[in-house]
C-alpha cells in the first residue's frame, strides 16, 4: 500500500546534503532561498513571486491575477512594480502607514500570496509544481507564517512544498505546520562532521574537491601541510579548519573570506566560516563596506531591509541603513523585523553617545514590543528611558506608552485610568517642549485621542467626543499637510464612539468622511457595511463589503459579513461560496461553520450540516446555536431522544435562546410528551413571539382537542405570518368550528 502524497521536510546539517536529497521527477521545481540575510522580511515570499513573474505566470492567459492580487504582490515584493502596472489608487494604498495594526495583520499577506501561487498552479493543469524553500529555519517570521499557510492549503499532488532546515528546531507557526502537513526526512551528514576518522590525505582531498573549491589543487594543499598517511589526531572539525586556514596563502584566505561575505553571510561551508572567523576584524569590516557599496550601486530596493543594513551592521560605522530598515518595517506593520533592526542598530551605539539616531531606534523598539504584546519588556524599556534619557521626544513616547498600557493593553484587572490620564499629561508636557512642527502637532492631536479613550472607558462619552473633535480641528489647523493621512484614526475612533452610543447616522457620516480622505480604507468600508447591514440596508452593505474585500489582502471578516448579507438578499449560492472561502482562510471559524450548516440544513443536506456542526462543536462545545442545530439534524435523522438531549444542552448554554425551547418541544411531542411540549413552547413564546411557535403550540392543543386554545394560537400565527398561509387558515377554520360546538 503506497503512502499518501505529502509535503516534505528535509533536515540535514549542511545545505549540500539537503540539496542532494532525491526529488520527484514529474514536477517542475522552483528553488527559493529563505534566509533572511538576503532581503529580510518576505525573502522566501518575494523569491517565489519573482519566480512566478520570471516564468510568465502573470502574462496571458492570466492577466486578471495581477489585478486581483496586486496589493499582496506589491507589498511583499515592491520591485514587482516594474512588471505590474500600479494605479494612483494602489500607489496611495501602498503609502498608508500600517503602524498600529494588530500583529495578525500580516497573515493577510500570507493568505494572499498563497492564493497567487495556487491560482498559477491551477491555470497550468498539465504541470506538477514543486517549491523548495532552503534555509527555512533562518527565515524571517513573516516568511515562516507564509510557508505555514502554503503547507496547509496546497495539495501536494499538484504543488509539492519542500522545506529544508539544518535541524528540527524551527520556530512556530512553521514548526507546527510541518509537523501536521509534511513528512520529515533526517539525512546523515556527508560533507562534514565533528570528528576526523580518516587520514589527512583522504580527508583533505574531500576538502579540496568539495569545500575549498576546485581552484585549490591537491598539489597546492600538499605544500601547505604535511600530508602523512597516518590517521589524523582526534580533534573537532572546526579546530582542524582553523588550523588549516592559517596555512593558506593570504590570497587564498582573502578569496574565501570574500566568498563568505558575498553569500551575505549565509554560507554553511565550514571552511568559509572558519577562515572568516579567523580573519582580522578590520579586514572583515572593509569587505563588508565594499559589499554594502556594491549592493547599493545595484539599485535593488529589495535589499534595503536585508543585505544592505546587514553589511553596514558588520562594518560597524553606519547606523542609518539599520534605522531606515526599522522605520520601513514599522510603516508596513512588520513588527518583529522592526524590533530586530532597532535592537541591532542600538547595539552599535554606546548609550553614552546616544543621539537622534539612537533615540529613534529606541522609539521603534519600544512601539514594536508594545504592538507585539511583550509587555514585560515594554515596562523594562520604559523604566530604562525614564532613568537614563533626557530627550524630550523619547520621554514623550515613553510616557504615552505607559498611558496606553494602563488604558488599553493591560488585562482589565490591571487597568488604571487615573494613572493613564496622568501619564498622558506627562507626555503632553514633554511634547510641548519640542520645536513646533507638523510632526509635533500630529503627536499632540493623538495624545488627545488617548485622553478620549480614557474618558470613554471612565463613562464620559461626551467629553471623549469633544476631545476627538478638538483633535481633528487642531490637526487641520496645525498640520494641514498631514491631515488627510492622519485624520483617519481620529475619525474612525469618533465613529466607534458614536456607534457605542447608538448614534448610528453620525457614525456613518464619520466613516464616509474618512473614506473621502482615504478611499481605500478597508476597515472603514467594513465598519460602515456593518452599520448598513444592521439597519437592513443590504444593498449598501454589500457595496461596502465588496470594497473592503477589494482594498485588502484576503481576510475572513469581510467575506463572512458579505455572506450574511447575501443570505438576506436571497442569494444563498453566493453566500455559500463566501462561507466556503472563509473556512479556506480559517478552517475552524465557528460562526462560518454554523452559518454554512444552516444553509445545508435548509437545503436538506443533513449529512453536510451535521459534519459542519460537529466540527464547530469540537472547537466550541458550549455554543448554544450549534447545539440547537445539531438537535435539528438529529430530528431529521429520526432520533428525537438524541435531539432532546442536544436541545437541553443548548438551553443550558443559553436559556434565552427561544429556538432551543421551541425545538425541544418538537422532540417531546414526537416522543408523546405533549405536556412537556406545551411547557417548552410557552417558554419559547415568552422569549419571542414567533409564528412557527404559535403554530406548533396550536397543533399540540389540537392534538389534545383543546380547540379554543388551538384556535387562538393559529390566529396569532396567522397574524404574525401576515396571512396567505392556506394550511394555517384551514386549521384555524376547523378549530373555530369545533370550539363553537
Image (cartoon, helix red, strand yellow):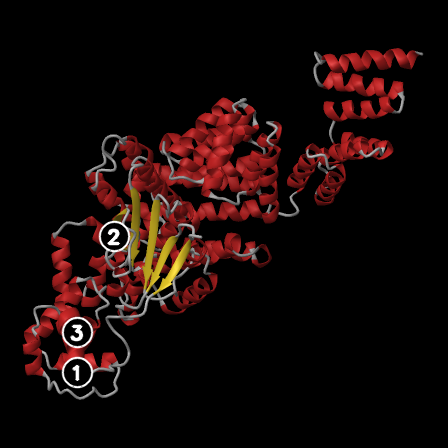
**Label 3, label 2: how far apart the Cα atoms are:** 26 Å
Tag 1 residue: 200
Residue 657 relative to residue 206: left or right: right
Looking at the image, residue 477 lies above or below residue 397 = above
Secondary structure of the residue carrying numbered label 3: helix
| Residue 434: x %, y % from top left | 33, 54
Q: Is residue 174 visible?
A: no
Figure quadrant of residue 55: top left
Count up the numbered dots.
3
Other-residue count near label 3 (Cα within 10 Å), few / some / many at <14 / 14–19 / ≥20: some
User: Mark 3 or mark 2, which is nearer to you?
Assistant: 3
Q: Nearer the viewer, residue 711 or 447?
A: 711
| Residue 592: x %, y % from top left | 54, 38
**Label 1, label 3: how far apart the Cα atoms are:** 10 Å
Please tell me which of labels 3 and 2 falls first in the chain: 2
Secondary structure of the residue carrying numbered label 2: strand
| Residue 121: x %, y % from top left | 32, 39
Q: Is residue 734 visible?
A: yes
Please tell me which of labels 2 and 1 falls first in the chain: 2
Tag 3 residue: 206
**Label 2, label 1: how far apart the Cα atoms are:** 35 Å
Looking at the image, residue 57 lies above or below residue 705 = below
Tag 2 residue: 31
Q: Nearer the viewer, residue 93 or 655?
A: 655
| Residue 590: x %, y % from top left | 56, 42
Other-residue count near label 2 (Cα within 10 Å), few / some / many at <14 / 14–19 / ≥20: some
Point out the image quarter for the C terminus. Answer: top right
Amino acid at each position: 500500500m503506497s503512502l499518501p502524497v505529502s509535503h516534505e521536510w528535509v533536515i540535514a546539517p549542511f545545505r549540500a546534503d539537503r540539496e542532494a536529497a532525491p526529488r520527484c521527477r514529474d514536477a517542475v521545481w522552483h528553488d527559493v532561498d529563505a534566509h533572511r540575510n538576503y532581503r529580510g522580511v518576505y525573502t522566501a515570499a518575494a523569491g517565489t513571486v519573482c519566480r512566478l513573474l520570471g516564468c510568465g505566470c502573470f502574462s496571458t492567459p492570466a492577466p486578471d491575477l495581477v489585478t486581483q492580487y496586486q496589493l499582496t504582490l506589491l507589498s511583499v515584493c515592491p520591485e514587482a512594480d516594474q512588471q505590474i502596472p500600479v494605479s494612483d489608487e494602489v500607489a496611495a494604498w501602498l503609502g498608508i502607514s500600517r503602524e498600529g495594526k494588530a500583529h495578525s495583520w500580516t497573515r493577510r499577506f500570507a493568505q494572499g500570496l498563497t492564493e497567487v501561487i495556487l491560482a498559477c498552479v491551477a491555470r497550468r493543469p498539465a504541470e506538477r509544481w514543486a517549491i523548495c524553500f532552503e534555509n527555512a529555519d533562518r527565515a524571517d517570521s513573516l516568511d515562516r507564517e507564509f510557508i505555514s499557510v502554503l503547507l496547509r492549503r496546497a495539495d501536494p499532488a499538484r504543488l509539492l512544498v519542500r522545506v529544508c532546515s539544518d535541524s528540527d528546531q524551527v520556530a512556530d507557526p512553521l514548526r507546527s505546520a510541518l509537523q501536521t502537513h509534511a513528512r520529515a526526512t533526517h539525512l546523515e551528514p556527508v560533507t562534514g562532521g565533528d570528528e576526523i576518522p580518516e587520514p589527512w590525505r583522504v580527508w583533505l582531498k574531500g576538502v579540496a574537491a568539495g569545500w575549498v573549491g576546485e581552484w585549490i589543487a591537491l598539489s597546492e594543499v600538499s605544500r601547505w601541510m604535511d600530508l602523512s598517511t597516518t590517521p589524523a589526531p582526534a580533534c573537532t572539525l572546526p579546530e582542524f579548519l582553523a588550523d588549516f586556514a592559517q596555512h593558506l596563502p593570504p590570497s587564498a584566505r582573502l578569496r574565501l573570506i570574500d566568498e563568505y561575505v558575498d553569500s551575505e553571510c549565509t554560507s554553511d561551508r565550514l571552511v568559509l566560516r572558519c577562515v572568516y572567523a579567523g580573519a582580522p576584524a578590520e579586514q572583515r569590516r572593509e569587505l563588508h563596506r565594499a559589499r554594502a557599496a556594491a549592493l547599493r550601486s545595484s539599485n535593488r530596493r529589495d535589499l534595503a531591509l536585508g543585505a544592505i543594513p546587514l553589511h553596514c551592521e558588520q562594518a560597524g560605522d553606519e547606523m542609518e541603513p539599520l534605522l531606515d530598515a526599522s522605520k520601513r518595517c514599522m510603516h508596513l506593520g512588520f513588527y518583529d523585523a522592526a524590533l530586530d533592526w532597532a535592537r541591532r542598530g542600538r547595539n552599535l551605539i554606546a548609550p553614552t553617545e546616544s543621539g537622534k539616531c539612537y533615540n529613534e531606534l529606541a522609539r521603534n523598539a519600544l512601539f514594536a514590543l508594545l504592538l507585539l504584546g511583550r509587555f514585560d519588556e515594554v515596562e523594562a524599556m520604559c523604566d530604562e528611558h525614564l532613568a537614563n534619557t533626557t530627550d524630550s521626544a523619547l520621554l514623550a513616547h515613553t510616557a504615552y506608552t505607559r498611558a496606553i498600557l494602563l488604558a488599553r493593553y493591560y488585562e482589565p484587572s490591571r487597568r488604571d485610568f487615573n494613572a493613564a490620564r496622568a501619564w498622558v499629561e506627562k507626555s503632553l508636557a514633554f511634547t510641548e517642549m519640542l520645536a513646533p512642527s507638523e510632526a509635533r502637532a500630529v503627536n499632540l492631536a493623538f495624545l488627545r485621542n488617548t485622553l478620549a479613550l480614557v474618558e470613554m472607558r471612565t463613562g464620559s462619552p461626551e467629553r471623549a467626543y469633544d476631545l476627538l473633535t478638538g483633535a481633528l480641528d487642531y490637526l487641520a489647523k496645525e498640520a494641514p499637510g498631514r491631515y488627510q493621512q492622519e485624520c483617519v484614526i481620529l475619525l474612525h475612533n469618533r465613529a466607534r464612539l458614536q456607534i457605542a452610543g447608538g448614534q448610528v447616522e453620525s457614525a456613518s457620516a464619520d466613516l464616509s468622511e474618512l473614506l473621502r480622505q482615504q478611499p481605500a480604507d478597508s476597515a472603514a468600508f467594513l465598519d460602515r457595511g456593518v452599520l448598513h447591514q444592521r439597519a437592513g440596508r443590504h444593498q449598501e452593505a454589500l457595496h461596502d463589503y465588496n470594497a473592503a474585500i477589494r482594498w485588502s489582502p484576503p481576510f475572513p471578516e469581510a467575506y463572512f459579513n458579505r455572506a450574511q448579507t447575501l443570505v438576506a438578499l436571497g442569494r444563498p449560492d453566493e453566500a455559500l461560496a463566501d462561507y466556503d472561502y472563509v473556512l479556506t482562510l480559517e478552517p475552524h471559524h465557528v460562526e462560518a461553520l454554523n452559518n454554512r450548516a444552516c444553509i445545508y440544513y435548509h437545503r436538506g443536506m443533513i449529512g453536510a450540516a451535521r459534519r459542519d456542526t460537529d466540527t464547530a462543536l469540537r472547537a466550541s462545545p458550549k455554543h448554544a446555536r450549534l447545539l440547537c442545530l445539531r438537535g435539528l439534524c438529529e430530528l431529521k435523522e429520526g432520533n428525537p431522544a438524541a435531539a432532546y438531549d442536544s436541545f437541553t444542552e443548548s438551553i443550558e448554554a443559553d436559556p434565552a435562546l427561544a429556538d432551543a425551547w421551541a425545538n425541544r418541544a418538537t422532540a417531546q411531542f414526537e416522543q408523546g410528551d405533549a405536556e412537556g411540549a406545551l411547557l417548552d413552547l410557552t417558554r419559547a413564546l415568552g422569549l419571542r413571539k414567533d409564528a412557527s411557535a404559535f403554530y406548533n403550540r396550536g397543533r399540540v392543543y389540537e392534538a389534545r382537542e383543546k380547540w379554543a386554545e388551538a384556535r387562538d394560537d393559529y390566529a396569532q400565527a396567522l397574524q404574525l405570518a401576515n396571512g396567505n398561509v392556506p394550511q394555517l387558515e384551514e386549521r384555524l377554520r376547523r378549530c373555530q368550528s369545533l370550539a363553537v360546538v
